[in-house]
Image: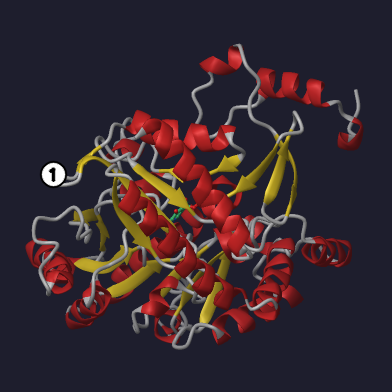
Amino acid sequence: MSYDVNNYSLQQALTDDRNHVWHHLTQHKPLEHQDPLMIVEGKGMRVLDAQGKEYLDAVSGGVWTVNVGYGRESIANAVRDQLVKLNYFANSAGSLPGAMFAQQLIAKMPGMSRVYYSNSGSEANEKAYKIVRQIAHKKYGGKKHKILYRDRDYHGTTITALSSTGQLQRKDQYGPFTPGFVEFPHCSAYHSPNGGDADFGIQAAQTMEATILREGADTVGAVVIEPITAGGGVIVPPQGYMQEIRRICDKYDILLHIDEVVCGLGRTGKWFGYQHFDIVPDIVTMAKGVASGYAAISCTVTTEAVFNDFKDDASDPMGYFRDISTFGGCTAGPAAALENMRIIEEENLLQNVQLMGAYLQQRLEALADKYKMVGDIRGKGLFQGIELVQDRASREPVDESVAAAVAADCMAQGVIIGRTNRSFERHNNTLCLSPALIASQSEIDEIVNAIDAALAKIA
Ligand SMILES: Cc1ncc(COP(=O)(O)O)c(C=O)c1O
């Protein structure tokens, strides 16, 4: 028996994995006869599997996480130094990296003020929901407790995060769900009969207002949305939509919670996705790219007004935010996040995302000219979706096996791309690209050329 992972044969690792590891989002029957994919090394945008095959990773670690790329020694060193100095103390106490990262983060989020640390996107959203629920109890006799979420958005894997998720297949077989979460319609112009209308953004936001009025505005405490729907098919909100959502929330005294778990920290070419729309939210959650997967960290960020609701009456022993996050006190997270943020700034990665994102979009649009199967190209920055359809006029989606075949062909060519997967009954048909923010033009070319070759075979 050894504990030395550096002296562990890859064959033994594959055997042990097959015998004992339960992988996320994976049907394991085929693994009785074949080895799982095991990624053993990464540098920049490339990873190596256990067989020594190299891949260009166009999805930043599979789920849009490794924003600054693999093999960043400076992040590893920052984490190591911090762990040797102090690895952990419960977050009721402060820490040096926790304080510094909060200050740096807030500097990039005008209007926001306070940072609450935890470890995953789901958990960050749960904290936000608890904040909303407790405000309902403190200020509105418990009545204003409902949280509206949007069809197609995803907010996480726990039962309550799933309760606020607008993806039926993701939720299927995991109910019953937490009460008090109410869905309103999506804002995808491509999937709406009136999507071509000049004021579609306003119309789409007003479906939320109709939902508020149906439920009773005095029962609704918050609305949670993604700035760009990610796993739901890369849906960019239409013109005017986000501003109208903000206006409606203000009108009915409803908190606006933006889930930046995917878009946060540069993915769309600004620090945060909502910053494309000239709005200030009340609550922002983030996770994946905060430390690019070098440590587990998530943040629930609020305005000072939200924070004050928990501070102002010190005579109430139950009145402060009584949430606990054990691992919110791990110092590796903010230490990694600080270095991650420094890299984004020093290497001008936001600018790179804008330039390379425009190039990626332009190359994908050329694919749309070439293949009738490419129904729509959507996205912002280095976050793009390619919706595959059977027929452009009807926009009838291809079967998910077609999107799976395109992704598998790219994989065989050595390029890892993503796709909507087990989210909806009919719309698991969008290929997703989210390469690291460091992507170069030649790497974008490699990604698009692989998709081109795959479509040439399959279309
Ligand atoms: C928009 C969004 N919110 C929340 C989550 C949940 O994050 P986690 O898997 O870290 O719990 C995800 C994960 O994909 C996500 O895409």
What type is the residue that disc 1 sits on?
Answer: Ser
Which image quadrant is residue 206 in?
A: bottom left
- Seen from the viewer's position, the closer of residues 414 and 459 is 459
Which image quadrant is residue 274 in?
A: bottom left
Q: Is residue 154 visible?
A: no
Q: Is residue 448 left or right of residue 334?
A: left
Residue of label 1: 394
The quarter in which the N terminus is drawn is top right
Q: Is residue 444 visible?
A: yes
- Seen from the viewer's position, the closer of residues 143 and 302 is 302
In the image as oriented, which residue stretches furthest toward the front?
370
Which image quadrant is residue 254 in?
A: bottom left
Task: Identify the residue at image location x=25%, y=80%.
Answer: 243
Whole-percent x, y for residue 191 in the image: 18, 52
Q: Is mark 1 within 8 Å of ligand 1?
A: no
Q: Is residue 66 above or below residue 373?
A: below
In the image as oriented, which residue stretches furthest toward the top?
33
Task: Identify the residue at image location x=47%, y=74%.
Answer: 272
Q: Is residue 298 left or right of residue 54?
A: left
Whole-percent x, y for residue 88 in the image: 76, 61
Task: Identify the residue at image location x=38%, y=36%.
Answer: 403
Q: Is residue 222 left or right of residue 87?
A: left
- Seen from the viewer's position, the closer of residues 24 and 429 is 429
Q: Is residue 255 above or below residue 81?
A: below
Whole-percent x, y for residue 428 in the image: 33, 39
Task: Identify the residue at image location x=24%, y=52%.
Answer: 151
Question: Is the image coloured rainbow, by chain, by secondary structure, or in one colour?
Answer: secondary structure
The quarter in which the C terminus is drawn is top left
10 Å crowding of disc 1: few (<14), some (14-19), many (20+): few
